[in-house]
Image (cartoon, rainbow, N blue to C red):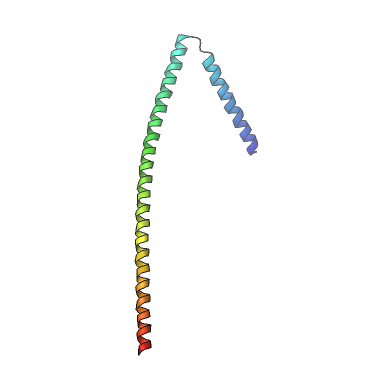
Amino acid sequence: SAQIADLQQKLLDADNGDRAKLRWDSIATILEAKCALKYLLGELVSSKVQESKLQSNLVQSQASCSDVQKMLMEERNHTAELEAEFQNQILVQEQQHQEKVNHSSWK
């Protein structure tokens, strides 16, 4: 069923493409040419507007990505600082414990 629907859609698409080509090939008068040109210019304007919107979205996405990368780097640095502090605390605790053990054994 899905394959049949897919094939039907492909036939429709091919048929529409052929119709559009025939329509453009069959332009015979100045009036038809003017209408075709008007249509093409409308499509061009529409495409330019869409391109502008997409470009704006791209710039916003790049800025957002840059912000996220900056935040990630700050978090990594903060994590590294915390880990260094934690390792330092462990070292201090081990030294204090060793001092207690040594002190206890002297008594």
Determine which quarter of the picture holds residue 41: top left
Residue name at image x 35 percent, y 57 percent: 77
Q: Which residue sits at x=36%, y=75%?
A: 93
**Quadrant (top left/top right/bottom left/bottom right) for the C terminus:** bottom left
Q: Is residue 28 above or below residue 42?
A: above
In this rendering, the count of numbered labels is: 0
Q: Position of residue 56 (x, y in %)?
A: 36, 36
12 horizontally vs 99: left or right? right
Q: Residue at x 36, y 87 (%)?
A: 104
Q: Residue at x 59, y 28 (%)?
A: 12
Which residue is most to the top?
29
Q: Which of 64 and 3 is in front in this view?
A: 64
Residue 8 in the image: state x and y as whole percent. Answer: 62, 31
Figure check: 60 above or below 8:
below
Q: Position of residue 7 (x, y in %)?
A: 63, 32
Question: Which quarter of the figure is the N terminus placed in?
Answer: top right
Q: Relative to 94, say whether 78 is above or below.
A: above
